[in-house]
Image: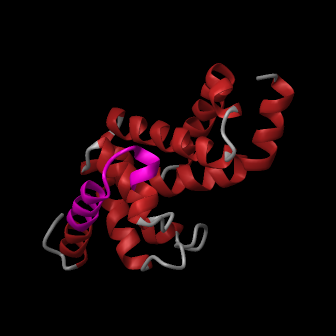
Amino acid sequence: MSRDEVAALYQRYGYFLLRRCRLILRDDAAAHDALQETFVKLMTHGATMQDTERPLRWLSRVAERCCFDAMRRNRKLQMARPVEAIDDEVGAHPSVDPSVRNAVLSLLGRMTEQEQQIAVMAFVDGMSQGEIADEIGTSRVTVNKRVQGIRERARRVMGGTDG
């Protein structure tokens, strides 16, 4: 992938991806680092993105993985800033209750990588369980179980029984 192609993708999607990284990490510096890492990966692995019809989805998934990796490296990132402070900047998907989304986001640092992926797709992007299953290559039953478990944990956080 040429530098001009990468620059054009950054121009087109960079702001959206930065907002997404800020939502997940709740730390401006870490979000900028994750965005930068996303575009470095694009420069090195961009050929796989060229085969997709949806470059934003490819870039979003790479950005999410960069964010999840940053969270694993630095557990303090989840405590950086309350999720509610980001609501005005990145509104919830219309099909997702903002309070549930905020509770789920507060739990990301305590989830497995698969749970993190499913949580973002379901509670941030508002994707259906079938879409999520197709995206991550697992069964809908597995996605359903994970979504229900994540939702239950979020309810406990909202009720103040899970810290």
Q: Nearer the viewer, residue 31 or 39?
A: 39
Horizontal arrangement in the rendering, residue 48 relative to residue 134 (left or right)? right
Main SS, magenta residues: helix
Which segment is the magenta one?
Answer: 133-150
x%, y% of residue 83? Answer: 43, 66
Residue 150, above or below 53: below
User: Residue 55, can we see it?
Assistant: yes
Horizontal arrangement in the rendering, residue 163 relative to residue 24 (left or right)? left
52 is within the stretch colored magenta: no
Q: Residue visible at 69% across and 44% down? A: 53
Residue 81, above or below 38: below
Q: Quadrant of residue 48?
A: top right
x%, y% of residue 88? Answer: 58, 74
In the rendered image, the residue lying farthest to the left is 161
Residue 58, above or below 96: above
Q: Residue visible at 57% across and 47% down? A: 60
The quarter of the image holding the C terminus is bottom left
143 is within the stretch colored magenta: yes
In the rendered image, the residue lying farthest to the right is 4
Residue 73, above or below 118: above
Q: Residue visible at 22% across and 61% down? A: 145
Horizontal arrangement in the rendering, residue 28 relative to residue 100 (left or right)? right
x%, y% of residue 109? Answer: 30, 49
The mark total stands at 0
x%, y% of residue 86? Answer: 52, 66
User: Residue 80, can we see it?
Assistant: no
Q: Residue visible at 51% across and 63% down? A: 125
Q: Name the image colouring.
A: secondary structure
